[in-house]
Image: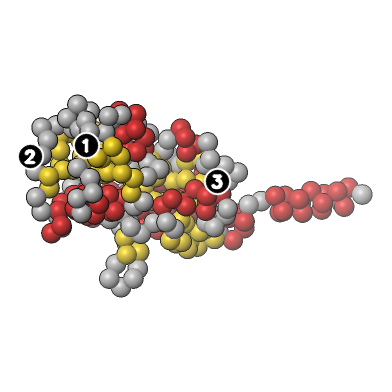
Amino acid sequence: MIRHLAGAVALALVIATPAFAQNQKVRVGVEGNYPPFSSIAPDGKLQGFDIDIANAICAEMKADCTLVQQEWDGMIPALNAKKFDMIVASMTITDERKKAVDFSDPYYDVPSRFIAKEGAFKDHSPASLKGKKIIVLRNSPRAKFIAENYKDSEVLLADKETNVYLELAAGRGDVALGSAVVSGEAFLKKPEGKGYAQLGPSIRIGAGSGVGIALRKDDAELRQKVNAALKAIRANGTYKKLADKYFDFDVSEGI
């Protein structure tokens, strides 16, 4: 009787153990349209800081990872529908998102910048942008920031960060708000960014929260392993080596 009970308990433990612990297969949701964090190389492969971080974490966890490309708006629903097991896609940690998912410790933080035609505005204050159309990424902390602080401005919501700048270049808005890094790499350094410039100083939206890896709320074991892996790659120099490939400043500042 005791032997049967012990066997039943052992079987229950096996059943209750997450699949990750059994075979170390992890599917990672990524975007592919947010350079230099995530983009598609000419050979069709995913590249960027997010991609490198995802691969480094997987290597540290000794996990067999598969990258799954997903449109930004569907990231959290796809995670909770178990299309993948975690999101490494420059997702800012916010209280609103914490209602739907859990987050790892932050792995970077980058300020935001307004972009406009050179000399078009003296600053990016609500008074200066009154009546103007501001372009910003939909379902983002920046969109919330604009809605709360620029009530006398119009808003155009773009479905992708890179489309924020395409809309600006097409003349569909007066000013854009985006990542200080992405706006430079994906727009200002490109031919279509000629005549545009960053407007005013950088701003930190939700300073201190940073960008984290999103995981399902019932996957505490994977979150613990991801946090341990993040600490390890910071300690062994891997993180700095990867960051130095893309940035000339410390993207971990403020986290």
Looking at the image, tell me whether mark 2 or mark 3 is earlier in sequence order: 2
Q: What amino acid is found at the position of numbered circle 1 in the picture? A: Lys
| N-terminal label among 1 and 2 | 2
Report which residue position mark 3 lands on: 216
Q: Front-most of 52 and 202?
A: 202
Where is residue 108 drawn, in percent x and y?
A: 33, 42
Q: What residue is at 10 percent from the left and 32 percent from the top?
A: 122
At a point 60% along the width and 44% down the height, the residue shown is 218
Hey, what amino acid is under mark 2? Gly
Q: Quadrant of residue 58?
A: bottom left
- Is label 3 or label 1 in front? 1
Alpha-carbon neighbours of circle 3 within 10 Å: few (<14), some, or many (≥20)?
Answer: many
Q: CA distance from mark 2 to mark 3?
A: 46 Å
Above or below, 105 relative to 12: above
How far apart marks 3 and 1 lie (CA) works out to: 39 Å
The structure residue drawn at horizontal position 20% and vertical position 54%, both measured from the top left corner, is 170
Q: Which residue is mark 1?
A: 132
Give the tally of numbered discs.
Answer: 3
The residue carrying pointer 1 sits among few (fewer than 14), some (14 to 19) or many (20 or more) residues within 10 Å by Cα, namely: some
